[in-house]
Amino acid sequence: MVKNSLFTKMVITYTIIISISLTIIAAFLSFWIQDYFIKNRKEQLSNQITIIEGLANEYIEGAIPYEELNGSMRFISGYINEDILLLDRNGYVYVITSNKFKGFIGKQLFVDQLDNLSQGMHFQTLNNYDNFDEKFYVLGEPIKGKDSKFNGAAIINISMSTLNKSLSNVFKIIWVSTVIAVIVSSIVIYYFIQKIIVNPISEMNVVARKIAAGDVNKRVVVQSHDEIGEFAESFNVMADSLEKVEQNRKEFLSNVSHELRSPITSIKGFIGGILDGVIPKEKEEYYLKIAYEEIQRLTRLINELLDLSAVESGKFKLQMRALDINEVVRLCILRNEARVKDKKLNVQVFFEEDELIAMADEDKIMQVITNLLDNAIKYADEGGLVTISCRSKGKKAFVSIFNEGPAIPEEDIKHIWDRFYKGDKSRTQKVSTGLGLSIVKKIIALFDEEIWVENKDNGVMFTFTLTLGKKA
């Protein structure tokens, strides 16, 4: 099957458009030149009428003989290259400048037009004389003597075959030029479409196939600043995104493998040591406790991976409703009361109002606040301060969670939402899976809200927004 390419379609389309356009122009020029040629020829012949009229009147008045009139008419006929007939006032032919019309001498012609000619009007018509195969363009002009007396008419016969021959040469030039213009235009269109459109698109097609095959480092060379250039730039942006996605995928698989391997290796080692009798009986409970903690860590990791997968795939539907965010904060603090006491933290809560009603999914907003509070507790200094504040401004609710502790380096702030990202080791603990903040970011994005982090003088503050609602 022959490939019906975009390039072929464009060349054919543009060639057809140009051909039609040039054909219309050529046809218009042909008709216009024909009309102009005839009008110009008529004006040239009309300029000789005055001379013809003067000679005819001199002959009628007896000032010159017939031979002189006939010779002068033949001279003028040769000059204008057309045949001249002179008619008297009754339409009888008395002078003919061409032998082919000699049979008309003494015959009456154009009787129907004599009345108009006698009133000073001229006439023009296409005429086919008897015994003539060709047509003649006839120009009739009245001959007037003294006191505007009608003395007859001068008939100039323009051979249509001669006229058409002259025009055909002009038409030939026009149509040959049109054909040449179409051919040249097609060649130019072929070249520019190939260079400007087809080649860049073909290059993008090749690069796209290589990217699809896994070579995500390939890029298109941007060679113009037009729409094709913008398309190429957008293609490269897409390729950059795909490369980043591929890199994130590889890092994700590497991180998951590492995070899963670590607790599994520990569990396997401890249980294997117990079964092999390497670990003393009195130490078995101690190592079983460590193995149990590793299992809990593994469970948290798998649960958070499932949560993250569910959020990213959009498998669950948000149940948005008006909630008292203050009450959600209270519940989250109560659930972490034991951890707060173990670390001897000072937790302070600031509510602007008794109730702060905002629109959210109850389970997901609970997960957001729990993860942020868990993060604050983990990284707060021993015996340090954790502050939670809820306030409203305009149509938004603002929830902030602060903990005293080491600041996040500026170069790490933009990466803290990434899965498994671990920058500052002072903020990295074994109990952390590296997925909590990523899940928080995804959930807040589903709410179509914002979240950000700031380094304060003596700690770190996370803040997110919710849209205010009305209590049901």
Image (cartoon, rainbow, N blue to C red):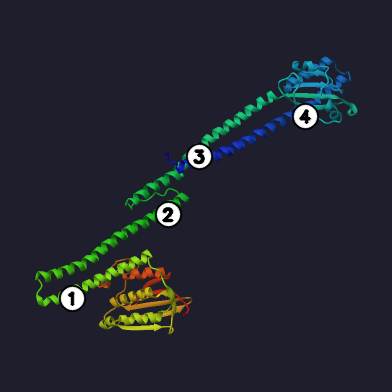
Q: Which disc, if any, is residue 124?
A: 4
Q: CA distance from mark 2 to mark 4?
A: 70 Å
Q: Which disc, if any, is residue 289?
A: 1
- Residue shown at 24%/66% (left/top)? 259
Can you give x and y, in whole percent of width and height, for residue 19 in the image? 56, 37
- Mark positioned earlier in the residue sequence (3 or 4): 3
Q: Are the residues tagged 3 and 4 within 8 Å (C-beta)? A: no
User: Could you tell me which secondary element the residue under label 3 belongs to?
Assistant: helix
- Mark positioned earlier in the residue sequence (2 or 1): 2
Can you give x and y, in whole percent of width and height, for residue 68 in the image? 82, 16
Closer to the camera: disc 3 or disc 2? 3
User: Could you tell me which secondary element the residue under label 1 belongs to?
Assistant: helix
Q: CA distance from mark 2 to mark 1?
A: 55 Å
Residue assigned mark 2:
234
- Residue shown at 37%/46% (left/top)? 206
- Mark positioned earlier in the residue sequence (2 or 4): 4
Check the image and report above or below for 51 versus 269: above
Dot 4, how many residues are within 10 Å of its Cα: few (below 14), some (14-19), or many (20+)? some
Q: Nearer the viewer, residue 325 or 215?
A: 325
Residue assigned mark 3:
12
User: Could you tell me which secondary element the residue under label 2 belongs to?
Assistant: helix
Q: Is 201 situated left or right of 413 in this image?
A: right
